[in-house]
Image (cartoon, coloured by chain):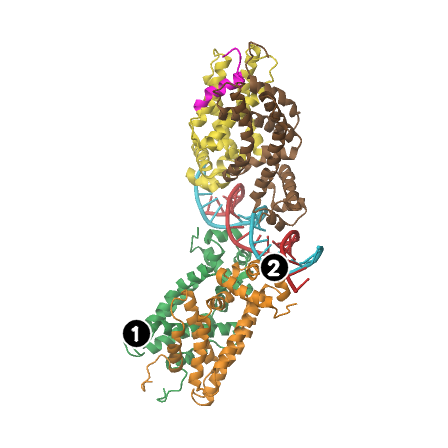
Chain colours: A yellow, B brown, C orange, D green, E red, F cyan
Amino acid sequence: MAKKRGKKFELIIDAAVKVIAENGYHNSQVSKIAKEAGVADGTIYLYFKNKEDILISLFEEKMGSFVQKISEQINGSMSVEEKLFVLIEMHLKNLADDHYMAIVTQLELRQSNLALRTRINEVLKGYLRLIDSILAEGAETSYFSEDIDIRLARQIIFGAIDEVVTNWVMKDHKFDLVSSAAPLHRMLLNGLKKTSAAE
Amino acid sequence: MAKKRGKKFELIIDAAVKVIAENGYHNSQVSKIAKEAGVADGTIYLYFKNKEDILISLFEEKMGSFVQKISEQINGSMSVEEKLFVLIEMHLKNLADDHYMAIVTQLELRQSNLALRTRINEVLKGYLRLIDSILAEGAETSYFSEDIDIRLARQIIFGAIDEVVTNWVMKDHKFDLVSSAAPLHRMLLNGLKKTSAAE
Amino acid sequence: MAKKRGKKFELIIDAAVKVIAENGYHNSQVSKIAKEAGVADGTIYLYFKNKEDILISLFEEKMGSFVQKISEQINGSMSVEEKLFVLIEMHLKNLADDHYMAIVTQLELRQSNLALRTRINEVLKGYLRLIDSILAEGAETSYFSEDIDIRLARQIIFGAIDEVVTNWVMKDHKFDLVSSAAPLHRMLLNGLKKTSAAE
Amino acid sequence: MAKKRGKKFELIIDAAVKVIAENGYHNSQVSKIAKEAGVADGTIYLYFKNKEDILISLFEEKMGSFVQKISEQINGSMSVEEKLFVLIEMHLKNLADDHYMAIVTQLELRQSNLALRTRINEVLKGYLRLIDSILAEGAETSYFSEDIDIRLARQIIFGAIDEVVTNWVMKDHKFDLVSSAAPLHRMLLNGLKKTSAAE
DNA sequence: TATGAATGAGCTTTCATTCAT
DNA sequence: GATGAATGAAAGCTCATTCAT
């Protein structure tokens, strides 16, 4: 079962994103997703093991291309500073471009149980490693201090970006998300404190 | 209804924290909470409007004292830098001291629907305003640059701390949470970048 | 228990009529009746065995005075025809004068279970016997044909009046109920058919 | 939903009549009806919107055929007198032939709330209009006096028949119901009073 | 007498999943 | 592969009644 990659596989994934974004996770019945996808309820189970598997697959599918897109944009010849900027900007841009997906990742996906969230974290790891690699390069090249705690720094970066996106979603996408990339980047790199030797 | 502040009110709140932390929100039936609290199922409804109201009340109750505790620790004569440190350390310490509550706030409370999350944010506002006031003081006293975006800075601070706590919870409280206060504080203030005029 | 005839006994009965008429039988909780009566929930059980007993008592109380009132109006010197008219008119008048009670007897009291309805019928018997006595007198005095089936005749009379009242209640007491007494009386006595020797 | 007219639809309706007649409306749980019908609880909800809808559908289903049967029996060439007799006799016969249904219509269906009873009245209208048409014909042909109050006359006829049936049901179907048709017919047409010019 | 906090049994409805066609 | 009718377990909430004060 779960013979992936049919045309219907994509159809169901996209239907799930739309239905969950519009109705909320707990009001997104399998039958509703099936109807939106234009397939029978039973058909869902030819492509997915169970309802939870739709969520996982959805996240894997979308997050996979997300990480790939960012990786492609980060050119080896860029400075660490530039790389971090591209990562932040792409992160914001990707979600700003897909309101449905933003709602799903920032709000609805977090309503799942611990088991599911553990699997989601598994998917996230690829992205977090990308951040780690930038941080490691910065440490090696002494752009960051050598004794930087990479795990903590990554949590700060990810937590900060994530919080900004969640606020944007909670505020109904009212403000322009991508324009936060620059100040976010600056504050993460230089901190909140005014530096004597100005930037 | 919701005749708050009985002895049973506290009893039920505490039982709910324990049951939800151990079983997850969606596997915490009202009857399970009632049993843990040592009251009848129906008694729950003398103190809470419905199941969701237990969650809200639980958060208001615990978060209220949380904000108060931190406020009390932040002495007017402290520097902005010190105030921020106290806030971060207290935030971490409060949750490190109550593993059950940490699980509930970082994981289970986020499984609620939009309506509930909106109310939770309402409760959070008190805490966010506390952060804002520190940031404003820093901007006024030129400890931070005057044109700092307070909203964004607050999101970075809160997002970073929150992410650190969530990681700690997801890792089963394996590492010492409070010891992250200092590096977290340093990085938020000074940023990731090595400063020429070393710290 | 059920130590009748306290001041509170009446208070509770009257509250029950009002609450049931306004909220419907199935939405008339004991606590609601208690509140309307201005007593504690538990007090109800000092005067009534259980909720059903309130209903029975209510009906006995009101129906008792109902039968008595009509009996008093029916003077021994009246003709059978006059007696029947008084009975019909009083029946209609009594209910027309107490909209709450009309709703309760015509609609809400019938929502009770078989056991309760059997007891209600017991109370009704006094009234039905009154009809029977008029019919018997009519048969004896040859005002009615001697072989009249009294049981059937009584059912027709009661059924007809009852249906008229129920229609009036269902139509929100829109038309004047008492003015139906005369045609009702005429049709019951003379039938629907036009008589050759006109009346 | 409410995808009527399946084989199961009939199955559930019939089970409901039996279960409600035997246990009373308020002791007829959906699960009990499902079990009697030999279907799963959930299946009920594929054919009926909710429990109340079973009652409505049950009445519409049975009452629909009831009105139709009587209409078919009433031949255009019959006299008004004959038509009324057929109506009364069929009314009694239909219920005498189905004790379960008689219990449900005379007792249990009346335990419903105002909203439900209003819908039941809607279904009843077809039957009441049939009575009205007979009365109107009688008035036109001067069989009845021209100034007869049709609404009132209809209430008398329906109320009388209904009361007779209810008494029969309350007395556990002890006596023969259909044999009441003739005297009922006679008394409704000629009234209770002995007519000088005998019939 | 009177109170009212506490009890806990009881029931409708939803919805993920299955499986005969 | 595709369907969708059928399943049945599961749980939040109400409310008549009790009883310690």
Q: CA distance from mark 1 to mark 2?
A: 58 Å
Q: Give the x, y percent position of residue D61.
A: 42, 61
Q: Secondary structure at mark 2?
A: helix
> Can you see residue D11?
no
Judging depth in this view, the residue of B149 and D60 nearest the camera is: B149
Q: Secondary structure at mark 1?
A: helix
* In the rendered image, the vertical position of residue D71 relative to residue D13, given as above or below: below
Label 1 with label 2: CB-CB less than 8 Å? no
Q: Give the x, y percent position of residue C56.
A: 57, 69
Judging depth in this view, the residue of C125 and B86 nearest the camera is: B86
In the rendered structure, the answer to whether residue A93 lies left or right of residue D129 reads right
Q: Chain of mark 1?
A: D
Residue receiving disc 1: D137
Numbered badge on residue A79: none
Judging depth in this view, the residue of A18 and A7 nearest the camera is: A18
Q: Label 1 amino acid?
A: Glu
* In the rendered image, the vertical position of residue D178 relative to residue D48, given as above or below: below
Q: Which residues are magenta?
A: A178-199
In the rendered structure, the answer to whether residue B105 lies left or right of residue D144 reads right
Residue in the picture at 59% in, 29% down: B166
Residue receiving disc 2: C41
* In the rendered image, the vertical position of residue D25 relative to residue B112, given as above or below: below
